[in-house]
Image (cartoon, grey):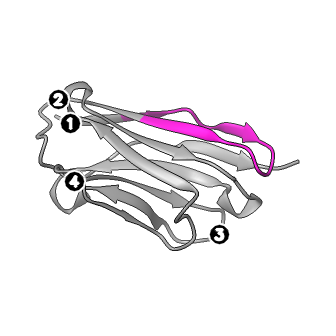
Amino acid sequence: QVQLVESGGGLVQPGGSLRLACAASGRIFSYWPMGWYRQAPGKQRELVATILGFGDTNYADSVKGRFTISRDNAKKSVYLQMDSLQPEDTAVYYCTAGNNYVYWGQGTQVTVSS
């Protein structure tokens, strides 16, 4: 059974930074895609960023140039460095992994507010 646990969320002022981490347990394949989605109150869950096993990345237009996704296959982990955070980035951030993103974490709250 695969489990994903996110950490690193919290409250930050506009313009600040946070680094999210997602640790996976169980049978994880290094070629699996991994990624981050987010869901703001009253909105649908949306893609933030994904990273393939060999490192190709994809970002939502709204976060390009501000967020950076990375992974450490030896640690079965994926990270999201978030810089220049804005109030519209406030959401619950979810880690996902596996073909067709079948596995999901419980989410970590990110709040951007002064």
For mark 2, does the 10 Å Cα neighbourhood hold few (<14), some (14 to 19), or many (20 or more) residues?
few
> Hey, which residue is sitting farthest right in the picture?
114
Residue 76 place in picture, x, y as percent: 24, 31
Q: CA distance from mark 3 to mark 1?
A: 29 Å
Q: Nearer the viewer, residue 62 or 37?
A: 62
Magenta segment range?
A: 5-21
Whether 33 is among the magenta residues is: no
Identify residue for label 4. 33
Q: Are marks 1 and 4 in contact (CB under 8 Å)?
A: no
Label whose residue precedes the other's in the sequence (3 or 4): 4
Left or right: where 85 falls relative to 97: right
Marks 3, 4: nearer the viewer: 4
In this picture, is 64 found above or below 93?
below
Q: Could you tell me the amino acid type at mark 2?
A: Gly
Q: CA distance from mark 2 to mark 3?
A: 33 Å
**What residue is rendered at 52% in x and 65% in y?**
64
For mark 1, does the 10 Å Cα neighbourhood hold few (<14), some (14 to 19), or many (20 or more) residues?
some
In this picture, is 78 found above or below 113?
above
- Identify the disc placed on residue 42: 3
- Identify the disc placed on residue 26: 2
**What residue is rendered at 38% in x and 42% in y?**
105
Q: Are marks 2 and 1 in contact (CB under 8 Å)?
A: yes
Q: CA distance from mark 1 to mark 4?
A: 14 Å
Q: Could you tell me the amino acid type at mark 1?
A: Val
Q: Indicate the secondary structure of the residue bearing disc 4.
A: loop
Residue 29 place in picture, x, y as percent: 11, 40
For mark 3, does the 10 Å Cα neighbourhood hold few (<14), some (14 to 19), or many (20 or more) residues?
few
